[in-house]
Amino acid sequence: MKLNNTHHAAIGALLACTTAVPSAALADDLNVILFSMPYTQGLDQLEADFEEKTGHTVNIDVVGQDVFESRITLSFTGQTGDLDVVHTPVIQVQRWIEAGWLQPITAAVDAMDTKDDILSGPLDAYLVNGERWALPFFAETGMMAYRTDLLADAGYDQAPENWAEMLEASAALKANDQAALAMRVAPGQGFNMFVYPMIMRAYGGTFFADYPTDLTPNMNTAEGLEALDVYASLMNDFGPEGIGNFNFGEVAAAMQSGQVAMIVDGTSIVAQALDPDASQFADQISIAAVPTGPNGRSPAIAVHGLGVPADAPNAEASFAFIEWATSEDVLTKIALMEAYPDFTRASVAQNAEVIAKYESIHPEFLNLKVQMLGDAIGHYRPLLPQWPQMGATIGENINAAVNGIMTYEEALETSDQDIADIMAE
Amino acid sequence: MRRHDMSVKQIAGVIMMLVFLAFTFLPIIWAIILSFRPKTHLFEPIWQSPAQLTWDNFDTLARSDFPFALFNSLVTAGTSTILAMIIGVPAGFALAKGRSHRKFIASWALLLLRMAPPVGFVIPLFLIYLNVGLLDTWAGLIAAYMVLTLPMVVWSSWTSLSQIPDELIEASLLDGATLFQTLYKVVLPAARPGIVATAVLAFLIAWNDFFFALIITRGDTVTAPVAIMNFVSYATVDWGSIALASIVLTLPTVPVIIFANRYIVQSMGGAVKG
């Protein structure tokens, strides 16, 4: 059989298609990688606005969190220069700075006309070693959601104000055959270690003897032990079946489906409980502050921003994108388009349409969020380069304690040892 | 007594088979149920609210990047399979019927390529692609898939074509056919079960790949297995869409398997078409 003209044409067409058709991505002026959340999904839809405004073309790639981790690790460690703007969670920023993966944007931020409109807490979360490394677009804090009807049946007309009351209310709910509380228990620095420090710090527990001046491990204390006891009791004695491996998805689903009466988690999860399209009992769910303890209240906090990779070829264009993406106009648009109450500009919080939208979800949502942000401490999770590794290890130990694999003392002692080992590396 | 023993064994066998089938099919059945459940009833047992069904997940999936990713999967897996067959089958034929003294080296090289972990290929490929502009292109992904499929096709064709009697080939050549004509008009029809099975397996290797696509694709060429991961976001896991996407990803393989099942079974039995 000889190849005729048809065969030649087919092969030629195949080669032309495979090499030419989808090769546009890396030809874009700017390549931006973000992991999926309401803000980033909204930003993706506004891509054309940026191109029209600046003349740059941009490829915004919004991916799952695991895909994001793989892509940026390969790009950063290989110094490939294929990324111009990167999603920068504050909890990772110290590690990325130490590894030389980000470039500072201090001068550009300081030259911004609207810098003072950015909430100072989230903005300064990226101030490390005297330099600014990212601009924030998301500041989430801890909050509680509760079923008013179930708590009323158990004899409570409001949410528990402190963790001791939470235990009592949970016992009363259990007496009514109702699982009381769901929180994240799955191990991970962004999973159980996002919520557990709310209890640990409320009871006076700390990761270190005196952060940041004395970094001697300090989890295995009487306060730490009491906090772990409260957390494990709440989960094991009053949580829903299978709580030992609950993550944010299961926590949200448990509240939406009526499986539990209360959750304590981030605002992005609490907002889902209030969403009538996703929650069966949205009209019977209210919100409250994170419970206090003997040492006060310590709501969780998570800040996300946009940074410039160290090997980004055109830092000026990268910052132009970041400035646009975190501008009042863009944040307002996304706050109205998506479930995005975690914006980082004061002007957005004062926008009448934004206020109206979030008041319709719950009249107190924005006010309570501001209150919780005020109570949160910046180093809720220690701002150290070693934290991601440390948080993962401590998370395993705390999870093991809740699941009965370790005693509480063993979990805290092991955590102290693990912290010391990681700090010594 | 013996008959009684046999029936007990048979019953035990049937029970084991049913348990295995349930173990295998329950996740698929569960995924199908999840695909039709609204978010508000996603985690309820189906018998608690059997009437709570929705098409919302279909709408969500249709509006996502998943259909585009599915098309990318089809193009890259299909093209890489065709190219691997075009190159690999003649190579397998040469190894099966040629008179080279270096077949031992070829067999080791092929085995090494088959057994090497994908991560050993993907990092160098990523760096090369970045420099030559093949990152996030169909051509790059197809070439990468051929790294996986070509050694398998050559090895498998070698095995299948070795069973073709030399006399058949000699008769064809004596009748005046060229080697090329002999391969395509005599040898391949006789070895059809093995060749079809090889093509199916090559397609499935590329179709189900996650790792290569994760590293060397971006938004323009993302494939379906990677796109499914994008339903896991910072604060939500869209279980309904994940379940539906998983079912959709499985669907194209079903007719392929049904169509090729006869050949795969024959291939396993080492049959050559008579």
Image (spheres, coloured by chain):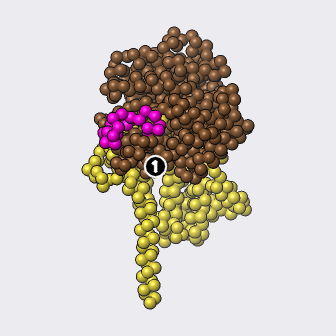
Chain colours: A brown, B yellow
Q: Is residue A163 above or below residue A123?
A: below
Q: Is residue A297 above or below residue A421?
A: above
What percent of the width, then of the height, locates residue B10? Answer: 43, 78
Task: Find residue A363 and report its image quarter.
Answer: top left
Kindly state the secondary structure of the residue where label 1 is placed.
Answer: helix
What percent of the width, then of the height, locates residue A30? Answer: 54, 24
Residue located farthest toward the left when viewing the structure as drawn = B51
- Image quadrant occupied by the C terminus of chain A: top right
What percent of the width, then of the height, locates residue A11? Answer: 51, 43
Q: Residue at x 41, y 60 (%)?
A: B25
Q: Which residue is mark 1?
A: A237
| Observer-nearest of B84 and A181 | A181
Q: Residue at x 62, y 29 (%)?
A: A383
Q: Chain of mark 1?
A: A
Q: Residue at x 65, y 58 (%)?
A: B111
Q: How many marks?
A: 1
Q: Is residue B8 above or below residue A205?
A: below
Tell me if B52 is positioned left or right of A289 in this view.
left
Amino acid at circle 1: Asp
Tell me if A346 is positioned left or right of A308 in this view.
left
Magenta-tinted stretch: A145-166
